[in-house]
């Protein structure tokens, strides 16, 4: 199968996971108020299992830890650089919350729940593909609780290094990395590894079910006719991944590293943007619309961008 068909089928499957949540919400079998408990399970149970499983899969290699660190550094630099560029371009409208959201949501992607299955399908023989998703997620969380919060609120007091470093994603990544160094794949009971893998594999369907429920509560006319939502989606799905691709294109790195950087950067807007908006009680509808529209549009953009990998 070509990269286009592989990515298209995997993105389509992810979007189909939204359908039951959407239908059940419309039938009033589930309510948005139920999402808080489900989101906690996703964040504190499924997500850690997904990342730990991804990190213990590869065989021990003297090169992989260095590549992990490099992936974090490049993705972190790309996120901060793009935010600063967009902030500079929108400096005359910095009081406009939509423009501040533009500079944040255009770089914060769903690299875990959405991105990890895509890169695994694209590089089925490369166990490090899942690892790179974890590394991108680390940089995303660091930026989210520092630079992103400052961009959204304009106040440094909301920045939290503690939240950036002590959150479920980073803690589970640290545990997974330690287990990788200890070669846990060789001695951890297979029953435990299998159980953790099963719970981790629930992450993507559960995340998309939640998005489907949220989609059912939105005004479709507003979702598709708000210019700033389209602008943010274009920034996230096209501008940022191409920016990341150019950063690594000329570097002496293997195709899996470069391909994962492109594909993970091309993922739709992350739900963490919505979480930040809800925490600071501003822009919740805009953040939700961006997450949903970019997710729907990704069925076109991700397969098209995947064609660059083998150019």
Image (tube, grey):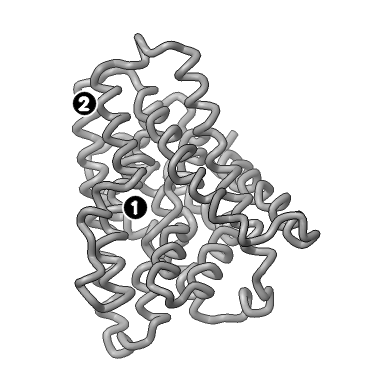
> Is the residue marked by circle 1 packed among few (<14), some (14-19), or many (20+) residues within 10 Å?
many
**Front residue (pair 109, 187):** 187
> Is residue 83 rendered to the left or right of residue 123?
left
Q: Quadrant of residue 81?
A: bottom left
**Front residue (pair 241, 291):** 291
Q: Residue at x 49, y 57 (%)?
A: 268
Which residue is disc 2 drawn over? 63
Above or below 277: residue 265? above
> Is the residue marked by circle 2 packed among few (<14), some (14-19), or many (20+) residues within 10 Å?
few
Q: From this viewpoint, is residue 265 visible?
A: yes
Q: How many marks?
A: 2
Instruction: Assign the C terminus to one quadrant of the image.
Output: top left
As drawn, the label of residue 245 is 1
Q: Quadrant of residue 89?
A: bottom left
Above or below 24: residue 4? above
Q: Give the image location of residue 280, x and y in percent.
A: 38, 72
> Is residue 74 rendered to the left or right of residue 286?
left
Front label number (2 vs 1): 2
> Is residue 296 rendered to the left or right of residue 182?
right
Label 1 secondary element: helix
Label 2 secondary element: loop
Q: Residue at x 77, y 60 (%)?
A: 28
Instruction: Assign the N terminus to one quadrant of the image.
Output: top right
Q: Residue at x 45, y 68 (%)?
A: 278
């Amino acid at each position: 199968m070509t990269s286009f068909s592989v990515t298209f089928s995997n993105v389509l499957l992810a979007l189909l996971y939204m359908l039951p949540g959407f239908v059940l919400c419309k039938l009033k079998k589930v309510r948005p108020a139920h999402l808080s408990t489900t989101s906690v399970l996703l964040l504190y149970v499924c997500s850690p299992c997904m990342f730990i499983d991804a990190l213990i899969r590869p065989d021990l290699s003297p090169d992989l830890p260095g590549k992990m660190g490099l992936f974090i550094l490049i993705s972190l630099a790309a996120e901060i650089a793009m935010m600063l560029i967009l902030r500079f371009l929108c400096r005359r409208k910095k009081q406009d919350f939509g423009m501040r959201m533009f500079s944040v949501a255009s770089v914060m992607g769903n690299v875990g729940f959405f991105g990890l299955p895509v890169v695994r399908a694209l590089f089925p023989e490369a166990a490090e593909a899942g690892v790179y998703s974890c590394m991108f997620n680390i940089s995303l969380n660091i930026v989210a609780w520092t630079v992103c919060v400052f961009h959204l609120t304009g106040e440094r007091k909301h920045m939290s290094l503690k939240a950036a470093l002590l959150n479920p994603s980073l803690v589970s990544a640290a545990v997974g990395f330690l287990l990788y160094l200890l070669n846990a794949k060789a001695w951890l009971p297979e029953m435990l590894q299998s159980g953790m893998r099963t719970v981790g594999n629930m992450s993507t369907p559960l995340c998309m079910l939640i998005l489907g429920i949220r989609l059912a509560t939105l005004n479709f006319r507003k979702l598709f006719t708000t210019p700033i939502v389209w602008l943010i989606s274009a920034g996230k799905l096209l501008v940022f991944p191409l920016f990341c691709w150019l950063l690594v294109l000329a570097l002496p790195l293997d195709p899996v590293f470069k391909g994962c950087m492109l594909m993970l950067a091309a993922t739709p807007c992350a739900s963490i943007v919505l979480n930040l908006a809800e925490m600071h009680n501003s822009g919740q509808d805009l953040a939700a619309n961006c997450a949903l529209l970019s997710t729907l549009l990704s069925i076109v953009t991700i397969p098209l961008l995947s064609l660059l990998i083998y150019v």
